[in-house]
Amino acid sequence: FSLMGIYTHLFFWFVVLVQLIISGRNYLLRFAGLFVFYIPWVPVVLTSILKGSKGFWVNKIDLQLVRSAIGNIFTSYEGTPGGLWYITAVVSFLIILASIFVLKKKRGEFTKLSIIWLYVPLVIIILISLWKPLFVNRYLIFLVIPMIFILARVIEIAKKFGVVVFAILLFFEISVFLYLGPYYRKIDIRESVRKATMQMEKDDVLVSKTPLTFFEVNYYSGFKSYLYAVDKNLIPTYVGKALIDEDKILPNFQNAAGKVFLINDDGSVTVW
């Protein structure tokens, strides 16, 4: 399972690291075995890191993000809508207080696991992000699990007040979901492609305006769409550039035999 994890996403190494810290020598041999099997993938990772340093979509980390990091992960807040950073900073502070409370009241292997699982990867990622921005909520979603464990411990320790704590947490989570949900609603690209193809004639072509929607548009069109790009070399590496074939790029609309149905990033369709 761990081997599949580290090949799926680089951040899974943090999960492996937590296991190593908790288990110590008992896990050392497995850790060495994982690294040996991962060696063929190391050149790919290094190449990606070097290429990615030339241009990356993740914003640089700042003090505001550091203060709000735990709260951002817990609520999935990424800055939209603006003005909620102070709330996630408060959530971060409360979870840190909850961690201290649990450590004082309920020490044990499970508590140790939860604390290490949450804070070791988080601190490492923040420190690395001072050099190369890597902090992305969805990459760190595995840290929500120890947060839940810590809060569950708080509810357990609180005994008769645990119900109140649980009710407050539930109310908060439902409120966050209802408020932030509309801002993160997924664009229905499938419907955009359906509407466009219904109007298309024999020589018309379907084109994605940017690489952000290309793969989705291409899938729903039966792999018959194109990407508008003047030059493939200008496409950022991090959007899956290596998977875009040259014959899928349309540098201009003048060479198209028929109409061009352009799918925009917001799902709207423009006809040229």
Image (cartoon, rainbow, N blue to C red):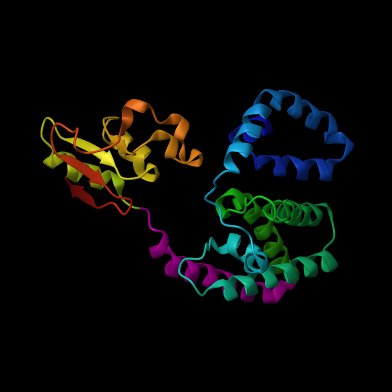
Give the residue at x 71% y 51%: 128
* Position in image of residue 78 (x %, y %): 52, 62
Q: In the rendered image, which quarter is residue 4 located in?
A: top right
Q: In the rendered image, which quarter is residue 202 located in?
A: top left
Is residue 67 rendered magenta in the image?
Answer: no
Location of the N terminus (image quadrant): top right
| Whether residue 12 is visible | yes
Give the residue at x 37% y 53%: 186
Q: Which residues are magenta?
A: 158-186
Q: How many marks?
A: 0
* Position in image of residue 67 (x %, y %): 67, 69
Give the residue at x 54% y 46%: 55
Task: Give the farthest residue toward the right.
Answer: 25
Is residue 179 rendered magenta in the image?
Answer: yes
* Position in image of residue 215 (x %, y %): 37, 37
Location of the C terminus (image quadrant): top left
Would residue 53 be found to the left or right of residue 128 on screen?
Answer: left
Q: Nearer the viewer, residue 106 or 215?
A: 215
Give the residue at x 26% y 30%: 224
Q: In the rendered image, which quarter is residue 10 located in?
A: top right
Would residue 229 be found to the left or right of residue 115 on screen?
Answer: left
Would residue 128 be found to the left or right of residue 252 on screen?
Answer: right
Magenta stretch: dominant secondary structure: helix
Q: Nearer the viewer, residue 249 or 39?
A: 249
Q: Nearer the viewer, residue 55 or 118?
A: 55
Q: Nearer the viewer, residue 269 or 17?
A: 269
| Whether residue 9 is visible | no
* Position in image of residue 161 (x %, y %): 68, 76
